[in-house]
Image: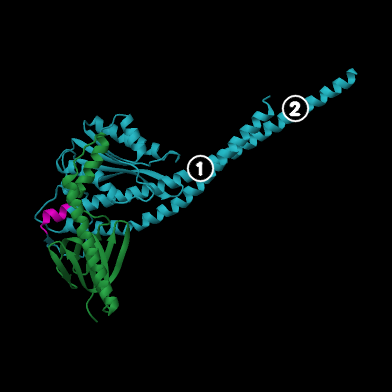
Amino acid sequence: MANEKEIRTKIKSVQNTQKITSAMEMVAASKMRKAQDRMRAARPYAEKIRNVTSHIASAHSEYHHTFLKQREIKRVGYVVITSDRGLCGGLNVNLFKKTINEFKEWDDRGAGIDLCAIGKKGIGFFTSIGGNVISQQSGLGDTPSAHKLIGTIKIMLDAYKEGRLDKLFLVYNSFVNSMTQEPNIEPLLPLHAFDQDDDLDKYWDYIYEPEATVMLDQVFMRYVESLVYQAVVENIACEMSARMVAMKSATDNAGELINELQLVYNKARQASITQEISEIVGGAAAV
Amino acid sequence: MAMTTHIDIVSSESEIFSGSATMIYAPAEMGEVGIAPRHAPMLARLKPGEVRVVTQDREEQHIYVSGGILEVQPHVVTILADTATRASDLDEVAALEARERAERAMHNKTDAIDYAKAQKEFAEAAAQLRSIEALRKRARR
């Protein structure tokens, strides 16, 4: 039987851990609420730019942008968004699993893969498995600013424009509700066909200022950036809710562990008392 | 009642303005443009400056944007404002930085870039000042 003092220290240490995890749970809960607000705040822009992009796609411009053209696939790019910090359950791991499965499919088809990793966990993982990470970004914090992402994404978009990549995907966790997050892989480029807006007349085009090539380029770039930004914000909300759930179960587990240890401790204490009594009785009998 | 058009001004981080207007002035890159309801479809790039929106009750709203995109449809005007200052060479810098991080390589050539950045910042500051001045003038009246 382990000695009383040992068990007591163990209980104390588990209690301390429990305090930390429950604090982390509360922090994650409040950050999750803020992250959800940010997710909502980013939505109008995403919607509006989506409208504009779909208008452009239905306008009869003489200029066809490369982002709209389908190409034969020789090399694909992935923008993978992960969290910077761990302790958020299986959030990143599930994402990696899904991504790796896709990688394998592309590999079997003989297509090469380039990566853009956003978030420390992704950078660490993909460099360790030997992925070709051509751009990376970490340390975005809880309030990511859109302009920190610009350069990171630009590398991928440039690669696409120059024909080094033929398809671009976005990988992130989508927020279903605070208990469920789903790893999600979405095609970014080429831009898929939009639903045609019925209100618009059939043949029309914009007045471009400056010329169409520059304008379309910029709108499409912004569109892709806004999609990525939206994904980053959503991923943070996922991270926080995953952490909240993970920390809650850690706190519960610690509680169970303390109960068990308390039982062992009581038994040990009882045993030592019994032993003392029997020793005293034995001693008295001997006298 | 005067004819109006709907206008939405959004930035990637939040919604800035939404409502109907009888006239909109925006600082397009090739000069300020005024947009009345039923304007022909137009797509223009904005430079840092202020967007003026004349609402139905003849009030003028002043909104500062640091560049962005203006889309005009006959009954809807959308301004996609940039939150950050953007210039193609600045984007280039950001791209370079990200690549450098990836390659873990250190380079030190910032002369040309800093100049461009300073110019851009200056343009933005000047536009901001102009808007503040305009506001002050109105307050005095």
The residue nearer to you, when weighing A203 against A280, is: A280
**Residue lying at 40% horizontally and 56% vertically, measured from the top left:** A37
Q: Is residue B99 left or right of residue A268?
A: left
Colour option used? by chain
The residue nearer to you, when weighing B133 against B53, is: B133
Q: What separation in Å lies between label 1 and label 2 (alpha carbons)?
A: 36 Å
Which label belongs to residue A247? 1
Q: Is residue A25 left or right of residue B84?
A: right
Residue B138 in view here: yes
User: As shown in the figure, which amino acid type bears the numbered disc 1?
Assistant: Met
Give the colour of chain A: cyan
Magenta-colored segment: predominant secondary structure: helix
Give the letter of the chain under mark 2. Answer: A
Write the start and end of the magenta stretch as one range: A210-217
Q: Is residue A271 left or right of residue A10?
A: right
Give the residue number, with chain letter if any, for mark 2: A271
User: As shown in the figure, which amino acid type bears the numbered disc 2?
Assistant: Ala
The residue at the far bottom in this view is: B1
- Mark 1 or mark 2: whose residue is earlier in sequence: 1
Q: Is residue A137 above or below residue A280?
A: below
Quadrant for the C terminus of chain B in the image: bottom left
Residue B55 in view here: no
Provide the letter of the chain coloured green: B
Q: Residues within 10 Å of mark 2 (few under 14, many from 20)?
A: few
Question: Percent x, y for residue A121?
Answer: 37, 37
Residue A215 on the magenta segment: yes
Q: Is residue B17 above or below residue B59?
A: above
Find numbered disc 2 in the image and state the secondary structure of the residue it sits on.
helix
**Residue lying at 37% horizontally and 54% vertically, measured from the top left:** A39
Find numbered disc 1 in the image and state the secondary structure of the residue it sits on.
helix
